[in-house]
Image (cartoon, helix red, strand yellow):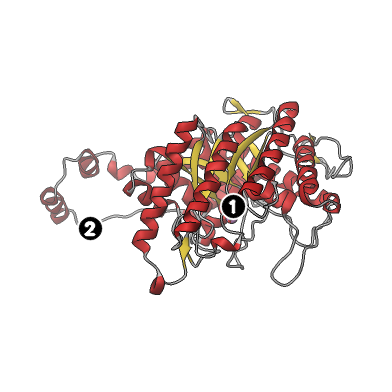
Amino acid sequence: MSYFGNVAPIKFEGKQSTNPLAFKFYNPNEVILGKTMREHLRFAVAYWHAFTGSGSDPFGSGTAIRDWDKFSGMDLAKARVDACFELLNILDVDYFCFHDRDIAPEGDTLQETNKNLDEIVAYIKENMKSSGKKLLWNTANMFTNPRFVHGAATTNNAEVYAYAAAQVKKALEHGKELGSENYVFWGGREGYETLLNTDMGLELDNLARFLHMAVDYAKEIGFDAQFLIEPKPKEPTKHQYDFDAATTLSFLQKYNLLPHFKLNIEANHATLAGHTFEHELRVSRLNGVLGSIDANQGDMLLGWDTDEFPTDLYSTTLAMYEILQNEGGIGRGGVNFDAKVRRTSFEAIDVVYAHIAGMDAFARGLQVAAKLLEDRVLENIIDDRYASFKSGIGADIVSGKASFKTLEAYALQNNPIVNKSGRLENIKGIVNQYLINV
Ligand code: XLS
Ligand code: NI
Ligand code: NI
């Protein structure tokens, strides 16, 4: 049984290829800066978009035509697992990611829900064993079910808080069972609509308590995944607590959670926060918490999380420029396609094309970023731009020798101040040359 029209595994054919079912840039075995592309990129397929998404939008029902939709209940859940391993094989992708509620239907009680989950997790485990595919991360969906209307770990209702804890406990057990390399907390409805009815202090304290309990439980059961928080500024709540990397860092620091967490940075969440993807990656990298990425892109004309497949080479290049400079690269994280095909791309084969486009865009970004680094293009520009801190008064500032008194004495005799051009357009032209020529 094939869900993707018996497509053969996608091979690298090079940039001249016109075969829509071939990689133009992603050559898993190509070695760049001492590591293969496969090792650098660690691609993952997102279960929720690839296998449970229907292509619906607020104005229209689902358009996606998927052969597994002829099933229902647990049969549907199993068919989706089959589709998942078929797609991973077609794409030659090693990893996948899921929410608990993506993989198995909820029952009438928590007991029943957990039983369904256990059964599908066992089925996934068998498939992982026979295929060698791996779980990059799992997470708990605590935002779809109406019980989470006021949030999960930041709810006003302690009964919901307990339920959420039970759900994450189970998800951690399943993560361990499947050898997941990371575990993600994305704050679905962890935020608020208005301060008029919100105890922000209590909500944040409770969120921290929740995360500490998760850390403790993972330790207790010997689940050694890297914990990741995925910042997002808004949607579904108006103000999400994990607004962006900097906000999340200060939260982790305040509550002594920093040793246990890194960040999963998503491109579209960065732009929703008014940042570039590379800004969020840089903030994370400089603070030693760049853990993994959710690869997608937004639409600058739309104010929500459109989760498009990443095809903007400028953005993938600057993202890979950050990842290459991160200690250990992407480490035990990966490039997870938290991205969905557009509603108008409703055939199953579109999911294959979309991943090919995204993988090629990241492979190309990797090539260009590596060459930029190798040639020290931006490094030389930056060294030159900050040269004033290498000697004289600048060196005194950096070494800590300067004080307001010595700086005043310098300023009083230094007249006029001379600035240099930032040469921005020239630099952008050089980056374009690399994008085209490498
Ligand atoms: C939603 C998030 C979500 C997380 C996993 O905007 O990106 O998909 O990645 O819960
Ligand atoms: Ni995401
Ligand atoms: Ni998102």
Whole-percent x, y for residue 175 in the image: 58, 37
Which quarter is ligand 3 in? bottom right
Residue drawn at x 38%, y 56% is 204
Q: Which residue is mark 2?
A: 416
Q: Which residue is mark 1?
A: 141
For mark 2, give the secondary structure: loop
Q: Amino acid at mark 2?
A: Pro
Would you identify the image quadrant in which residue 363 lies?
A: top right
**Does residue 327 appear in this view?**
no
Looking at this view, is 168 or 362 the one in front? 168
Whole-percent x, y for residue 335 in the image: 61, 41
For mark 1, give the secondary structure: loop
Whole-percent x, y for residue 82 in the image: 79, 40
Of callouts 2 and 1, the N-terminal one: 1
Dot 2: few (<14), some (14–19), or many (≥20) neighbours within 10 Å? few
Q: In the picture, which quadrant includes the N terminus?
A: top right
